[in-house]
Image (tube, helix red, strand yellow):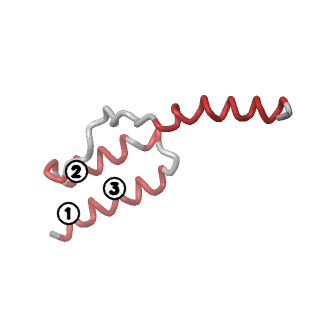
């Protein structure tokens, strides 16, 4: 005989597996295009900052894109 807490755990696991196997829908946000130009790319990176978990990295990337544009 299986104890109740194990039965409940098994039932929960069986229910959660199909949910975990669902594919996520692609993001509705437009991607960053290289054809937009460096200023537009930097602006798009900076626009992502409020929702980002690492805004310092996004700022670093935006500055890098701008610096590469000045070197060309």
Task: Establish if 10 lies above or below 34.
Answer: above
Image quadrant containing the C terminus: bottom left
**Which numbered disc covers residue 62?**
3
The structure residue drawn at horizontal position 47% and vertical position 50%, both measured from the top left corner, is: 55
Residue ID for mark 1: 69
Mark 2 element type: helix
Residue 49 horizontal/vertical position (percent) = 43, 44
Q: What distance separates the C-alpha of mark 1 from that of mark 2?
A: 9 Å
The structure residue drawn at horizontal position 85% and vertical position 34%, both measured from the top left corner, is: 1
In the image: residue 56, left or right of residue 38: right
Asked whether the beta carbons under mark 1 and mark 2 sit within 8 Å of each other, the answer is yes
Count of marks placed on residues: 3
**Which numbered disc covers residue 17?**
none
Q: Residues within 10 Å of mark 1 (few under 14, many from 20)?
A: few
Instruction: Compare marks 1 and 3 and give the one earlier in the sequence.
Output: 3
Task: Establish if 51 lies above or below 70.
Answer: above
Instruction: Compare marks 3 and 2 and give the one earlier in the sequence.
Output: 2
Instruction: Compare marks 1 and 2 and give the one earlier in the sequence.
Output: 2
Residue ID for mark 2: 39
Viewer-nearest residue: 9 or 20? 9
Q: What distance separates the C-alpha of mark 3 from that of mark 2?
A: 9 Å
Q: What distance separates the C-alpha of mark 1 from that of mark 3?
A: 11 Å
Viewer-nearest residue: 67 or 48? 48
In the image: residue 61, left or right of residue 72: right
In the image: residue 65, left or right of residue 20: left
Asked whether the beta carbons under mark 3 and mark 2 sit within 8 Å of each other, the answer is no
């Amino acid at each position: 005989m299986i104890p109740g807490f194990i039965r409940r755990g098994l039932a929960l696991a069986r229910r959660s597996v199909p949910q975990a196997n669902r594919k996520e829908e692609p993001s509705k946000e437009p991607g960053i295009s290289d054809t937009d130009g460096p200023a537009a790319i930097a602006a798009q990176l900076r626009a992502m900052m409020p929702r980002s978990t690492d805004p310092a990295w996004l700022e670093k990337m935006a500055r890098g894109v701008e610096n590469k544009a000045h070197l060309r």
